[in-house]
Image (spheres, rainbow, N blue to C red):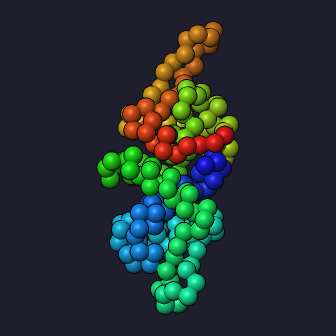
């Protein structure tokens, strides 16, 4: 998976869960998917439309009622859905999913397979603000998915961040290609 696509994909809260459910065999109609995700109808609809725009899912032609369409994964969507399923299986509880559905959590975990500086993470993520990155790093540290170490080998010490514990499992489930 490429980082740019991962950032776009995780910008909507329920995208990963919708893809994982479709990958795991959930019916592709809206009502069962809404019930399985636990999302509000508005949030779900926004995430579904976002996935259609990204080319991950499409309406199944010739199936379903026009007002109750059925959705299916595209070829690219099937690959991404397998990754989404692996990520969600790495997050073992509902509280963990509440962190994963935040915009920057998954891309940050994807980048921290090796120790990274704040500036390197910010540079790789492009549009992220300093505040959003700082808050996301703190959230992931609090969950103990990210370890912050101070590198004192240079004249000016600096922090580095590394995915650990469940964060490491999620990092490996993503399989980022930079």
Residue placed at 56% from the left, 79% from the top? 59
Left or right position of 101 against 93: right
Query: In the image, residue 100 lies at what x, y percent?
Result: 44, 49
Query: In the image, residue 131 lies at what x, y percent?
Result: 56, 40
Residue 38 occupies which quadrant of the picture?
bottom left
Residue placed at 58% from the left, 10% from the top? 153
Query: In the image, residue 14 lies at what x, y percent?
Result: 47, 62
The quarter of the image holding the C terminus is top right
Judge by depth and name the residue closer to the eye, 77 or 101. Answer: 77
Residue 40 occupies which quadrant of the picture?
bottom left
Left or right position of 142 against 178: left
Judge by depth and name the residue closer to the eye, 133 or 161. Answer: 161
Examine the rendering and report whether any part of residue 33 can be seen.
yes
Examine the rendering and report whether any part of residue 50 can be seen.
no
Residue placed at 32% from the left, 53% from the top? 94
Residue placed at 54% from the left, 68% from the top? 73
View extreme (left): residue: 93
Q: How many marks?
A: 0
Query: In the image, residue 150 lies at what x, y percent?
Result: 51, 18
Rendered view: 45 above or below 124: below
Rendered view: 169 above or below 59: above
Residue 52 occupies which quadrant of the picture?
bottom right
């Amino acid at each position: 998976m490429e980082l740019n696509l991962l950032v776009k994909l995780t910008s909507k809260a329920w995208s990963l869960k919708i893809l994982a459910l479709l990958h795991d065999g959930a019916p592709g109609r809206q009502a069962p998917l809404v019930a399985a995700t636990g999302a509000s109808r508005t949030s779900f609809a926004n995430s579904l439309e976002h996935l259609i725009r990204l080319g991950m899912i499409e309406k199944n032609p010739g199936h379903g009622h026009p007002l109750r369409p059925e959705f299916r994964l595209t070829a690219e969507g099937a690959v991404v859905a397998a990754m989404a399923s692996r990520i969600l299986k790495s997050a073992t509880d509902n509280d963990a999913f509440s962190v994963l559905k935040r915009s920057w959590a998954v891309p940050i975990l994807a980048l921290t397979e090796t120790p990274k500086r704040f500036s390197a993470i910010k540079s790789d993520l492009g549009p992220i603000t300093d505040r959003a990155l700082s808050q996301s790093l703190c959230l992931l540290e609090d969950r103990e998915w990210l370890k912050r170490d101070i590198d004192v080998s240079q004249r000016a010490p600096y922090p580095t961040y590394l995915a650990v514990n469940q964060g490491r499992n999620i990092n490996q489930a993503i399989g980022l290609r930079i």
